[in-house]
Amino acid sequence: MNGWTLERKQRQAELIRQWQPWQHSTGARTIEGKAKVSRNAFKGGLRAILKDAAKYLREQKQLIDNLG
């Protein structure tokens, strides 16, 4: 059990319906804030950079091998 009785869950649901937090949620308002949240899903991008570098090195190796 997590400590939430049926009565407690019902009371919490009632309070949330009264508060209506979804009415007050606006998201980012400033340009800086919007720029910041636009990067929320960014995971770093290092893998894509390394993948491109490996592809470039393979192509260079193939060119060198074809010369000799």
Image: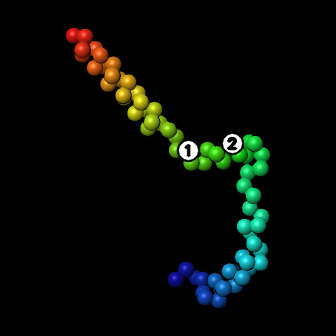
Q: Amino acid at mark 2?
A: Ala
- Residue 63's place in the image compared with 51, above or below, is above
Residue at point 45%, 32% (across, down): 49
Instruction: Tell me if 28 is positioned left or right of 46 in this view.
Output: right
How did the renderer colour the structure? rainbow
Question: Considering the numbered disc 2 on the image, is that residue within a helix, a strand or a loop?
Answer: helix
Q: Amino acid at mark 1?
A: Phe
Which quadrant of the structure image shows residue 24?
bottom right
Task: Please state the horizontal and vertical placement of residue 64, each as a whole percent of the image.
Answer: 28, 14
Residue that appears at 69% across and 84% down: 11
At horizontal 45% and vertical 36% (from top left) the residue drawn is 48
20 in relation to 66, above or below: below
Q: Which mark is residue 51?
A: none
- Where residue 62 sits: x, y (%)? 28, 20
State the mark number for residue 35: 2
Q: Quadrant of residue 26?
A: bottom right
Residue lying at the far bottom in this picture: please name it: 7
Q: Residues within 10 Å of mark 1 (few under 14, many from 20)?
A: few
Residue 44, percent across and down? 52, 40
Identify the residue at horizontal 73%, vertical 78% (top origin).
17
**The label number, if any, that marks residue 42 in the structure image:** 1
Q: Counting residues from the N terminus, which is met first, the one under dot 2 or under dot 1?
A: 2
Q: Secondary structure at mark 1?
A: loop
Is the residue under label 1 in contact with that under label 2 (CB below 8 Å)? Answer: no
Q: Residues within 10 Å of mark 2 (few under 14, many from 20)?
A: few
